[in-house]
Image (cartoon, rainbow, N blue to C red):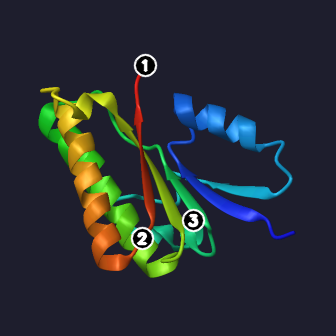
Amino acid sequence: MKKIRVAITGNKGFLGKHLVESLKNKKNIEFILFDKKKNSLFNPKTLESFLKGVDVVVHLAGDNRDSDSNLIKKNMLGTVGLLEAMVRYSPKAKKIFSSSFQVYGGKSAYGLSKRLDEDVIQIFSIIYGIKSIILIISN
């Protein structure tokens, strides 16, 4: 049986740590962890080794504490960089993105950044055919 290759960003965060822990015991899943020393979401060229040959990309990385403009820049540009790299290096991979309930009626920069991420993912889905799932997560 072929192993499913899963690339995970945000593997050091709360959700990422728990996801990695739950995948450790799955025999048919191989996971690749994002490494900030080798990879940058802002530089798609650095993501080739991270994304090459993966079946699924779980995008959990993002900031939720910073100035408003930095939150929007980091989260949106990081998502755009990852999507650009997926088009180049893993165009058939499926993308799972963790959004937030704050996209609904919230007036926070974090909520806005997540809403912009969702819009960019939908655009890449339409233009490049990247199959995506957006999870709206609440605490």
Give SS at disc 1. loop
- Residue highlighted by disc 3: 50
Residue at x 27% of width, y 42% of height: 114
C-beta proximity under 8 Å, tags 3 and 1:
no
Judged from the image, the secondary structure of the residue bearing numbered disc 3 is helix
- Callout 1 amino acid: Asn
Counting residues from the start of the chain, the first of labels 3 and 2 encountered is 3
The amino acid type of the residue labelled 3 equals Phe
Amino acid on which the number 2 mark rests in the picture: Ile
Identified at 19% across, 43% down, the residue is 72
Residue 61 position in % (x across, y down): 43, 44
What residue lies at 14% left-to-right and 33% top-to-bottom?
A: 68
Q: CA distance from mark 3 to mark 2?
A: 17 Å
Task: Please state which of residues 68 and 26 is positioned toward the viewer in this rendering.
Answer: 26
Task: Give the Cα separation between the discs numbered 2 and 1.
Answer: 28 Å
The residue where tag 1 is placed is: 139
Closer to the chain start, of discs 3 and 1, is 3
Per the model, the C-alpha gap separating discs 3 and 1 is: 29 Å
Q: Which mark is residue 82?
A: none
Find residue 75 and report its horizontal and vertical position in percent.
Answer: 29, 46
Choose between 21 and 48: the one closer to the eye: 21
Which residue, given by chain and number where applicable, does mark 2 sit on? 130
In this picture, residue 94 sits left or right of residue 103: right
Judge from the rendering whether residue 78 lies leftward or rightward of residue 67; answer left or right.
right
